[in-house]
Image (cartoon, helix red, strand yellow):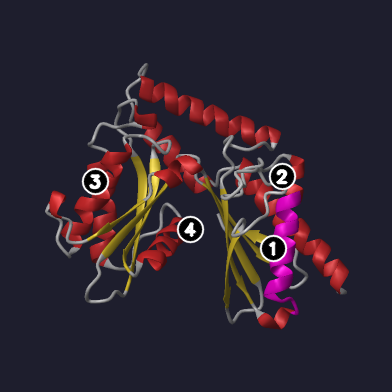
Amino acid sequence: MNKEKTKTVLIDSFLELIRKTSAELPPDIITALTYYAKQEDANTKASWAVELMEENIKLAKEKSAPLCQDTGSLLFYVDYHSGLGVSTLELKSAIQKAVILATEKGYLRQNSINSITGKNEPSNVGPSHPHILFEEQGEEFIDARLILKGGGCENVGVQYSLPHAPLSAGRDLEGAKRVILDAVLQAQGKGCSPGYLGVCIGGDRSSGYEESKRQLLRAVSDENPLPELKHLEQEIVEMANQLGIGPMGFGGKTTLFGCKIGHLNRLPASFFVTISYMCWSYRRQGMRLASDFTISKWHY
């Protein structure tokens, strides 16, 4: 395949990834929403809010329109193989062009703002927007995953440095649990609950945020391979759903759909716990590209 044809096919594949991520929630997210919707009492603000969410999901898919007016930051995770004859520069160019086309077609809103001038960037392309993380892998295909993360849920993300005296949170998993639940309590439904948490224990300040967002790539049903973290994930969801915050902060039984926790090594002097919050409109999708760069499968 010549370079121009390769570029065209790559752009088309990434454009479809953006469209699908923006307009269609993955089955595992819908299953979780359906399950927890049944927990809410009928004829309450909580049940009303969840019913609107379900209607919104249906209409967005039917019309191939954004699930949310805030189409969010674009976070791409691309695992590639160098033997396929396409460089990261070419992949980056294809992704940026796909973002521009997706914006023109209405799959994305013009949400990229120049932080110095305050002016909107109509193309949705600018410094770190989209944000792309590349990783070379050994198998001969390309895996690309995308998270669209809105500003509301991004605003309630937080990082704690342990020990944290106000919560008597020490440098251990019990301390981590206390600050994670505090993050949910402080959000009070802001960030469009019910939501999902991606958490990183350890790392430095920057790697902690990166890993916490990478945890959001995990499927809802995925179980942590570390028993202590598996237990902590389950405990966080159970305890958060007893806080009474509920859908959109209206009160109710469902504040969190899930919690995924990873860990990174840290320095002796630092112990960070980083929490990234994702709203109910959990726009996350992934695709595998075959050797001809067409989409061979969806990951969610």
Q: Which amino acid, mark 2?
A: Pro
What is the C-alpha distance between the residues marked 3 and 4?
Answer: 23 Å
Q: Which residue is mark 3?
A: 182
Residue type marked 3: Asp
Sequence-first tag of 1 and 2: 2
Question: Is 32 one of the magenta-colored residues?
Answer: no
From the image, give the main secondary structure of the stretch colored magenta.
helix
Q: Is residue 185 left or right of residue 95?
A: left
Q: Which residue is mark 4?
A: 217
Dividing the image into 4 quarters, which one contains the N terminus? bottom right
| First reached walking from the N terminus: tag 1 or tag 4 | 4
Magenta region: which residues?
A: 85-100
Where residue 198 appears, as percent x and y from the top left, is 38, 55
Q: Quadrant of residue 201?
A: bottom left
CA–CA distance in space, label 2 to label 3? 38 Å
Report, in whole angstroms, how far the alpha carbon at label 1 lies from the one at label 4. 19 Å
